Image: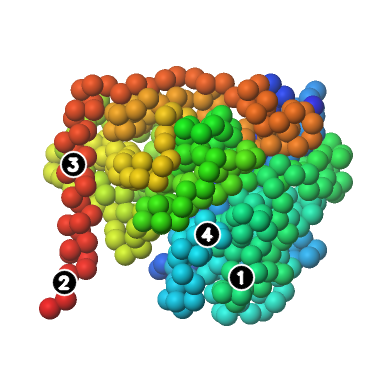
């Protein structure tokens, strides 16, 4: 019996079917836009996303009748939630973590609870990118919608519920609300009281890899699935990505190269709050039991999508008509070696350690003779510089990284992986299946339903490593000087954006 993993991301969704030994039997991808109804707002049309998820499922299973799907699990983007009625109807849009709505609640929240206490319970520091402030905003500004909502589901839990499962959410996604008790594995009454939040509006929590029901007969007929397919709780997309690339042991780290670039080191202990808070680092359950992850992240693939839509929109339209991947064409234009352009990748609110919301992207060094391929390479480099600046502070927490496992759309690019190896000065291993999120979700489904005895066995059987990218001595030397200049960009831009008071 085959297994389906679904990965619902910020800009697209993938459904993939795998055999028990990890062979890809069918897959489909659908891209959808981020709606920006007003400055500072960013949301997904939840109805559109759900239609695209269903379409991807139909296509992915269309050629798998000889090895029918027996179980499904869903990984998804983290903080965004979907208002859903008790009769499984989507009621409104899904506000993304970059949406500024809810920021006005932060001052009062910060006064009501010490940052260290919040971290001790939840493993996160206060910020507007979590679900909590969006829930508070919806309750105040859209009371009719809030009142009609049965549960606010994170996307992984939402898809499972709409397919016919029970109203449940996994530990990892629950953690993205700021209302979850990491140690107890339950919603926190203390945090709900602090925030004035309604826990009854949230689904009950279960560990990743828990059977949550079966696909309804009506949905099975509509999607081309067999009857009785089991539904299994998934996890935050970075967590299933880590599982899908085999990063389940302490010292390993997943490098997820999707819309957001994310380094997720694996560790078994919980570092103390006073070590993690200064670095802006969280602690979250891994999809693999008994382990934790933290997330070092910022924009990655989103920068290339901006480049595509800004500098190559016509090529993209032609490629879509012809069924080609436009990035394969665009990446052929990048120079073979580092150039003189520097990019500060603050095109949206940044990740750790500062979570800067009032910066902006910067491309330094443009000249009339600058070619667009040079800009593309500089965007790729800027995304990696950002991660390196965070990784250099990781030893202070006691978390180590001995090996990087690269997954996600960006990991298809040899050039980008070599850039990563040269800037990090470390070896990267690409997995044979770059789409680790869908595979990781499928492995969770298999472990929960007895296909595998454990997630450890699942990864040993199904996860295969591919190419290795070693640091190039010349590239490391060239990037050492450019990285030093990169580190000066934000301090100088900050002095312009925030001039000193007279």
Number of marks present in the image shown: 4
> N-terminal of the two: label 2 or label 4?
4
Residue holding disc 4 = 120
Q: Residue at x 21, y 68 (%)?
A: 498
Q: Is residue 251 left or right of residue 69?
A: left
Q: Which disc is residue 484 wearing? A: 3
Is disc 3 placed on a helix, strand or loop?
helix
Check whether the beta carbons of the residues at disc 2 and disc 4 lie within 8 A of each other. Answer: no
Q: Where residue 258 appears, x then y in whole percent? A: 47, 41
> N-terminal of the two: label 4 or label 3?
4
Q: CA separation, marks 3 and 2? A: 25 Å
Is disc 2 placed on a helix, strand or loop?
loop
Check whether the beta carbons of the residues at disc 1 and disc 4 lie within 8 A of each other. Answer: no
In this view, the residue in front, 158 or 189, is 189
Q: CA separation, marks 3 and 1? A: 44 Å
Q: CA separation, marks 2 and 4? A: 35 Å
Local crowd size for mark 3, using a 10 Å CA cut-off: few (<14), some (14–19), many (≥20): few
Check whether the beta carbons of the residues at disc 3 and disc 2 lie within 8 A of each other. Answer: no
Image quadrant containing the N terminus: top right
Q: Is residue 192 visible?
A: yes
Q: Residue at x 86, y 40 (%)?
A: 228
Q: Is residue 170 above or below residue 188?
A: above
Residue holding disc 1 = 190
Image quadrant containing the C terminus: bottom left
Residue holding disc 2 = 500
> N-terminal of the two: label 1 or label 2?
1
């Amino acid at each position: 019996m085959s297994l389906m993993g679904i990965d619902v991301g910020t800009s697209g969704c993938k459904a993939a079917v795998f055999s028990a030994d990890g062979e890809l039997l069918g897959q489909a991808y659908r891209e959808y836009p981020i709606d920006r109804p007003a400055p500072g707002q960013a949301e997904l049309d939840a109805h559109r996303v759900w239609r695209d998820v269903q379409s991807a499922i139909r296509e992915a299973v269309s050629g798998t009748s000889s090895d029918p799907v027996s179980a499904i699990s869903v990984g998804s983007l983290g903080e965004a939630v979907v208002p859903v009625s008790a009769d499984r109807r989507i009621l409104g849009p899904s506000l993304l973590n970059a949406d500024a709505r809810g920021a006005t609640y932060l001052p009062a929240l910060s006064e009501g609870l010490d940052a260290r206490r919040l971290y001790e319970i939840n493993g996160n520091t206060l910020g507007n990118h979590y679900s909590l402030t969006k829930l508070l905003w919806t309750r105040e500004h859209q009371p009719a919608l809030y009142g009609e909502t049965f549960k606010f589901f994170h996307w992984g839990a939402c898809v499972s519920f709409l397919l016919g499962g029970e109203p449940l959410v996994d530990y990892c996604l629950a953690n993205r609300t700021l209302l979850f008790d990491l140690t107890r594995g339950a919603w926190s009454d203390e945090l709900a009281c602090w925030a004035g939040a309604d826990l009854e509006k949230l689904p009950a929590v279960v560990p990743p890899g828990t059977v949550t029901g079966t696909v309804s007969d009506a949905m099975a007929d509509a999607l081309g699935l067999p009857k009785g397919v089991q539904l299994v709780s998934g996890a935050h997309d970075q967590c299933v990505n880590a599982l899908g690339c085999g990063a389940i042991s302490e010292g390993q780290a997943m490098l997820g190269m999707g819309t957001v670039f994310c380094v997720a080191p694996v560790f078994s202990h919980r570092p103390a709050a006073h070590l993690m808070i200064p670095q802006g680092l969280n602690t979250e359950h891994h999809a693999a039991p008994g382990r934790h992850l933290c997330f070092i992240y910022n924009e990655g693939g989103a920068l290339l999508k901006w480049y595509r839509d800004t500098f190559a929109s016509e090529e993209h339209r032609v490629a879509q008509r012809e069924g080609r991947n436009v990035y394969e064409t665009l990446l052929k234009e990048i120079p073979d070696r580092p150039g003189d352009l520097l990019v500060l990748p603050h095109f949206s609110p940044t990740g750790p350690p500062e979570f800067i919301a009032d910066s902006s992207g910067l491309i330094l060094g443009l000249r009339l003779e600058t070619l667009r391929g040079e800009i593309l390479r500089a965007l790729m480099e800027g995304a990696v510089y950002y991660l390196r600046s965070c990784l250099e502070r990781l030893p202070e927490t006691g978390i180590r990284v001995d090996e990087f496992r690269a997954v996600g759309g960006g990991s298809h690019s040899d050039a980008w992986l070599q850039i990563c190896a040269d800037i990090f000065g470390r070896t990267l291993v690409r997995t044979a299946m770059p789409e680790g999120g869908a595979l990781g979700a499928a492995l969770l489904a298999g472990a929960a339903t007895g296909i595998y005895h454990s997630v450890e066995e699942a990864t040993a059987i199904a996860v295969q490593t591919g190419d290795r990218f070693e640091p190039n001595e010349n590239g490391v030397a060239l990037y050492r000087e450019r990285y030093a200049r990169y580190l000066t960009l934000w301090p100088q831009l900050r002095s312009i954006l925030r001039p000193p008071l007279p």
